[in-house]
Image (cartoon, rainbow, N blue to C red):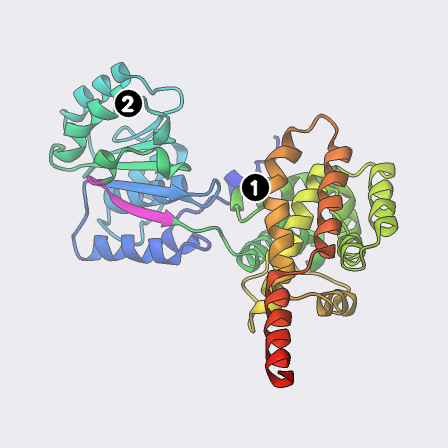
Amino acid sequence: MASQVTALKWRPQTFDDLVGQEVVSQTLKNAIKSDRVHHAYLFAGLRGSGKTSSARIFAKALNCEQGPTDTPCLKCPSCEEIKLGNALDVVEIDAASNNSVDNIRELRELVRYNAARDRYKIYIIDEVHMLTTSAFNALLKTLEEPPPNVVFIMATTELHKIPATILSRCQQFDFRQIPLFKIEARLRVIADSSKLDIDDESLTLVAQASGGSMRDALSIFDQVIAASGEKITGLDVRSILGVVEDAILIDLLTGVVKQSADQVFGRINELVHYGHDLKQVYETFTGFIRDSIVLKSCADTSELLERRYGHGDSHQETLGDMGTPDLIRMLDVLVKHEPVFRQAASPRYAFELVFLKLLEQRKLVPIERMLDDLKTFVENEKKNG
């Protein structure tokens, strides 16, 4: 029998299993305890942050034989059926493929019927932002005044596409990007449970590549396991994922700081020669500059950095030659040119163009320094006059 995908095998089954969404979990648990269950919820946030899992857990909590309870038993028929996705009274709808006004009219007809067995009839509408304008309008009245014991739970990754008329009828929950250290901790639990020989550096690299999405982290985790041998090391993971080495990032930054076109173009040539994806390098370097700003600006950076960097002495030495305004200007150039870079027919030329702009920018005198020099000049003129 084929092994089950890790993201499915380790899908959260209770509120306590959810990673990085403690505020959402506690609020929903309190609503159940105090018997203040709303009729419509909107879960919004990054992909893989736990929206659909939370909706299913909430459905279990409401329909569990022991409930409503904030700790569903996971053993009763209702809990088992919701876990398997075949519960008669918990209907999951993919709005991406059921987005027409006719689909919503059918939903409105179904809502009129009582639950077949369970306490609540629950509709989970995933990717709700994909509904058409007419479909949203058809949903409004039902969403505002649904029959008793009917609960709507909608999930979206694009909150800005949800009409204000829908938002005003829902309790909105914002799902945060999951901190990297929490993803690492979860991966360690899974690795130990699966008896995998994998080092901490590997888990850190997987977490960094996930972009704060637990589902992405587990998919990458499966990829790493499939491509590696019995023992998984950081070197293996770097090779599999094409991770950009810290030394490369520091060399590129140092080349800009020293205004050394030779160093910058030399590094870019090496990246191309060894087959690096320049779009990935660009994204990584942009994050590196952002993290450098955090290091220069904040006292406690433990939960603020997107990535942990080695070569600390070299990094700090390079940052010592730059002020925070210099880094902010660099980040501004990188962010503004990112759409142009993405659409470029030749990534290398676009990559080199951005770094040429960064090199030229270093030659410019910041306006703050010009003002200081002018102020000093005026003061000296007054003294001499």
Q: Is residue 88 magenta?
A: no
Residue 319 appears in which quarter of the rendering? bottom right
> Looking at this view, is 253 or 234 the one in front?
253
Amino acid at the residue labelled 2: Thr
Camera-nearest label, 1 or 2: 2
Mark carried by residue 133: 2
Look at the image and tell me whether residue 229 can be seen: no
- Report helix, strand or loop for mark 2: helix
Q: Is residue 321 left or right of residue 156?
A: right
Residue 207 image position (x, y, % from top left) = 61, 51
Q: How far apart, in angstroms, are the residues tagged by discs 1 and 2?
A: 31 Å
Residue bearing mark 1: 216
Q: Is residue 214 left or right of residue 29?
A: right
Q: Provide the residue span drawn in magenta.
A: 168-174
Amino acid at the residue labelled 1: Asp
Mark carried by residue 340: none
Quadrant (top left/top right/bottom left/bottom right) for the N terminus: top right
- Reply above or below: 163 against 283: above
Residue drawn where x is 59% and y is 50% of the image: 332
